[in-house]
Image (cartoon, helix red, strand yellow):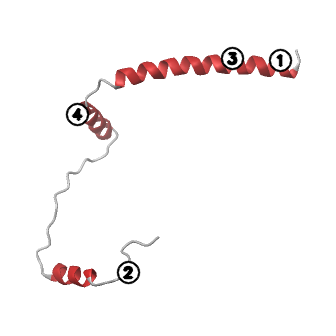
Amino acid sequence: MSTNEELLELVKGLSEKIDGLQVRIDKLEVRAANVPESHLIAIAAAVAAYLGEKGARRQPRYASGGGWVTNTRSVQHVHHPLYTR
């Protein structure tokens, strides 16, 4: 067998494997399309808990002092872009 024939056989074998995998991926996509988002969130939370990730619900904190008012007012008067890259 020449090198070209061997390469052709390898390419044919890989093409068959890719076709088989594509069929399996299509089947998985059809199954995943029917899962509601609430179930996906519950599954993700369960996996995260199993892996030891602490799910923290964060409560917004509101500033009680008057310093933020002064800071905000001074920032509004600045004439340069806020975000530079």
Q: Earlier in the sequence, mark 3 or mark 1?
A: 1
Q: The disc labelled 3 sits on which kind of residue?
A: Gly
Q: Secondary structure at mark 2?
A: loop
Which of the two discs, 3 and 2, labels the residue nearer the N terminus?
3
User: Dot 1: few (<14), some (14–19), or many (≥20) neighbours within 10 Å?
Assistant: few
**Residue tagged 4:** 38
Indicate the position of residue 63 as horizontal and vertical percent values.
14, 72
| Rendered location of residue 69, percent (x, y) | 16, 80
Amino acid type indicated by mark 4: Ser
Q: Secondary structure at mark 3?
A: helix
Confirm or deny contact between disc 3 and disc 1 (CB under 8 A): no
Query: Which residue is the site of mark 1?
Result: 5
- Amino acid type assigned to the residue bearing label 2 in the image: His
Quadrant containing the N terminus in the rendered view: top right
- For the point 56% across and 17% down, which residue is it? 20
Q: Which residue is mark 3?
A: 13
For the residues labelled 3 and 2, the Cα–Cα distance comes to 61 Å
Q: Which residue is mark 2?
A: 80
